[in-house]
Image (cartoon, coloured by chain):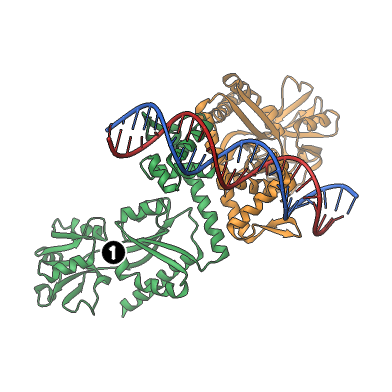
Chain colours: A orange, B green, C blue, D red
DNA sequence: TAAGGTTACGGCGATCGTAACGATC
DNA sequence: GATCGTTACGATCGCCGTAACCTTA
């Protein structure tokens, strides 16, 4: 047994049990991969993969049992490398952030900018995806940390830190009836609505707010992306319900935003990362940076 | 990085950081070990071991940080091998039991006998040691399971299962004054006492029983071993306080045993094993066997 | 028949062992 | 000077790549 065989099992998991894909990922030829797997199975004395003919189609019972040990080993191996790299030079490295569009555009710019100043040597990869995919990316180590509002609290393998709280806002073109007068769910519901897709950016809280009333919103457009929503609001398709911080007073001068904190429960954006995954120092600092930005934001909201 | 390097770190931990001892354990020459360590440290980019001259004397800060990852990897690697061996043939293997003398002699014979019948192919290693050492043996994987009464509950890395409860008994030669009349701590304390060493077989409960009374026992002989205590009781040196199940009505016909359950709190013998350590099927069955024996014992005690 | 997996074989590189050397108690 | 660790060098074994072959969608 050796570490590249362990690595191979991990890669096979993430590539539909395809030896050829695995070979590609490992930058060696397929035959080598094939042989390594054979050697590994021979050493254990029992097949790890279920086969249809020659093709691998899944794990055997044995495979299912050992795969979590494999994951543990791979994680620990990466931790060793990360810890060492951190120790040698904690100003160099890669920061992989997985987040949703809203966070990337309306919350992260500030913390990322200050982080960049402190750590010019760290390459930042930002990947946008749905909250569900974000969690998956953490597990496959395609991301070190995830920032999002939904889903993340359910996974026991994750450490989840609350980051900041925010409220939804309704956005309408200037002169729209909703730009004046008292707001209520009833009044909102009388217009066609544009808001986030299910599972995105606090959409669940909108549902919760409505659940008790028995009313339904006429959501004519759902998007993962605030800018898409704003665009169609500008075109007069309806009223947008977006995250409060996604309204930019400068850029969105043609739109009116009104706070919905009294109508829709507040949403909590969280920072999540794998429990057993060692985070480099700079990543820990980036988290601090985000918490700081969150704090400043909440102060400015009070004014 | 490879698995034998990881293994090397573990072996160095357990052998005073001596490269030559490590080489011996790994069945390779010292120079090979030396080079592997150099390669490993070079790959990480920073030394893992503190050196005095050429000699290794301890871990660096980096070393301390990675050593727990190393332990994780080694454990997971062993788990893979154990799981596979279990899968190939769950009737063959090794069962390493660490326990104290009292358990080995007075509790384990029955479960071990029935286990042996079911699994004639499993080699049984039984090692006797102090409770403290038992725990250490679990951590260094010199034992799979430990059975003992003291200490074991304090370690969060362990899974601890209660096995059975028992009481102390006083043993005296026939015709000894204590063989008749009412028993009390005062009366006990008026004789020279022979009992278990500190940290062994419920000794702590004897201390607890006395603590509130302000009395002190005159313990003229402490031993880890019930048979030693009995031997000196037979010689008339004093009265023995031993575990109730350590009195054998057949062998100890020349001695009188009297229950102390009203005077000394009951003791709990536990089964302990490492949380992250995979136990072969037969070991799990051995645990069942012990729990069964414990149950039967408690029933026969009721009669 | 193309794509995926296995088998055979040759070459290269990693790692071991021997041996000589260096340092430390 | 005995023990422990390092360095140098030759030999071996493991692993990869090429290539031919087998199998299934």
Q: Residue at x 80, y 38 (%)?
A: A193
Q: Is A220 left, or right, of B180 in this rendering? A: right
For the residue pair A73 and B215, the one nearer the viewer reads as A73
Residue A247 position (above or below residue A203):
above
Image coords of residue B186 (percent x, y): 12, 64
Which residue in the structure is indicated by mark 1? B101
Task: Specify the subunit that label 1 lies on.
Answer: B
Residue A177 position (above or below residue B124):
above
Q: Is residue B124 visible?
A: yes
Sort mark 1 into few (<14), some (14-19) or many (20+) by Cα contacts within 10 Å.
many
Image coords of residue D5 (percent x, y): 40, 34
Q: Residue at x 53, y 56 (%)?
A: B81
Q: Is A96 left, or right, of B189 in this rendering? A: right
Where, quadrant-wise, is the C terminus of chain B in this rendering?
bottom left
Q: Residue at x 55, y 66 (%)?
A: B89
Q: Quadrant of residue A175?
A: top right
Q: Secondary structure at mark 1?
A: helix
Where, quadrant-wise, is the N terminus of chain B in this rendering?
top right
Q: Is B278 left, or right, of B133 in this rendering? A: right
Image coords of residue B59 (percent x, y): 40, 35
């Amino acid at each position: 047994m050796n570490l590249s065989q362990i690595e191979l099992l991990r890669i096979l998991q993430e590539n539909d049990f395809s030896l050829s894909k695995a070979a590609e990922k490992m930058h060696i030829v397929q035959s080598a991969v094939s042989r390594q797997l054979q050697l590994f199975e021979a050493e254990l004395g029992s097949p790890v993969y279920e086969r249809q003919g020659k093709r691998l189609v899944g794990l055997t019972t044995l495979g299912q049992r050992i795969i979590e040990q494999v994951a543990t080993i791979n994680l620990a191996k990466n931790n060793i490398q990360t810890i060492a790299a951190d120790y040698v030079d904690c100003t160099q490295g890669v920061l992989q952030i997985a987040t949703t569009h809203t966070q990337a555009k309306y919350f992260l710019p500030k913390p990322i900018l200050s982080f960049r100043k402190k750590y010019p040597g760290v390459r930042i990869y930002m990947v946008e995806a749905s909250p569900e995919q974000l969690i998956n990316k953490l597990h496959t180590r395609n991301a070190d940390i995830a920032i999002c509002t939904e889903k993340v609290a359910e996974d026991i393998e994750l450490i989840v830190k609350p980051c900041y709280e925010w409220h939804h806002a309704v956005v309408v073109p200037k002169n729209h009836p909703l730009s004046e007068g008292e707001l209520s769910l009833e009044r909102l519901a009388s217009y066609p609505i544009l808001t986030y897709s299910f599972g995105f950016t606090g959409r669940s809280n909108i549902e919760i707010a409505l659940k008790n009333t028995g009313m339904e919103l006429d959501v004519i457009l759902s998007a993962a992306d605030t800018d898409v929503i704003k665009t169609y609001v500008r075109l007069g398709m309806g009223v947008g319900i977006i995250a409060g911080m996604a309204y930019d007073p400068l850029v969105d001068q043609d739109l009116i935003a009104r706070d919905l904190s009294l109508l829709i429960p507040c949403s909590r954006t969280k920072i999540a990362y794998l429990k057993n995954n060692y985070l480099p120092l700079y990543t820990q600092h980036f988290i601090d940076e985000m918490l700081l930005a969150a704090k400043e934001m909440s102060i400015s909201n009070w004014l």
